[in-house]
């Protein structure tokens, strides 16, 4: 796995994002305590980080770039995979990004598979028999 793929995986990892936010809160709190001239700014940043932490724990996130383009929270909302371990953001179609256990339904895996190029670009190995159907062992939304 390349460096870019590892960074992308950590960026999408729910657990990694929580740890990163907590580390930033601690660092900013120490800076705010030690450096009086910037205390107000860092307290503001800490408040923003607590908001980010709350959103992360609740499972709510938006793609800011898409939000600015569309001005729509609905269109820019980011979802987590069915396992809840990763966010579906960024360079999703890179090698080993997601596998079948990250999807709850076959249709969701199929959408991801097709978005990433289908059989020609099945870098995640969702279609083992190369018939164009991803994660055939997953249940269908139609059978819910």
Image (cartoon, helix red, strand yellow):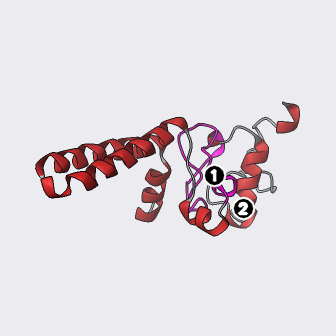
Residue 115's label in the rendered image is 2
Residue bounds of the magenta highlight: 72-101
The answer, for residue 83, to whether it is visible in the render is: yes
Residue appearing at x 25%, y 52% in the figure = 40
What residue do we see at 71% from left, 51% from top? 128
Q: Which residue is mark 1?
A: 77
Across and down, in percent, residue 132 comes to 80, 57
Q: Is residue 54 magenta?
A: no
Q: Residue at 39% of width from left, 48% of height from top?
A: 48
Horizontal arrangement in the rendering, residue 90 relative to residue 43 (left or right): right
Task: Judge whether 118 appears above or below 87 on screen.
Answer: below
Overall secondary structure of the magenta section: loop
Asked if 143 appears above or below 113 in the picture, the reply is above
- Percent position of residue 94, x then y: 56, 62
Quarter assignment of residue 69: bottom right
Front-lying residue, 65 or 20: 65
Question: x%, y% of residue 102?
Answer: 62, 42
Is 84 covered by the magenta stretch?
yes
Q: Nearer the viewer, residue 114 or 36?
A: 36
Q: Earlier in the sequence, mark 2 or mark 1?
A: 1
Q: Above or below — where is 119 with respect to 142?
A: below
Asked if marks 2 and 1 touch (Cβ < 8 Å), the reply is: no
Q: Quadrant of the C terminus?
A: top right
């Amino acid at each position: 796995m390349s460096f870019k793929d590892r960074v992308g995986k950590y960026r999408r990892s729910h657990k990694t994002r929580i740890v990163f936010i907590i580390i930033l809160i601690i660092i900013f709190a120490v800076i705010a305590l030690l450096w009086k001239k910037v205390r107000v700014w860092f307290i503001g940043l800490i408040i923003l980080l607590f908001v980010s932490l709350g959103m992360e724990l609740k499972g709510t996130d938006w793609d800011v770039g898409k939000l600015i383009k569309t001005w729509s929270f609905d269109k820019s909302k980011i979802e987590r995979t069915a396992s809840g371990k990763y966010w579906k953001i960024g360079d999703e179609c890179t090698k080993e990004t997601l596998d079948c256990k990250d999807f709850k339904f076959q249709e969701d895996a199929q959408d991801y598979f097709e978005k990433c190029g289908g059989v020609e670009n099945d870098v995640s190995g969702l279609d083992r028999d190369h018939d164009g159907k991803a994660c055939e062992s997953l249940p269908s939304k139609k059978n819910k």
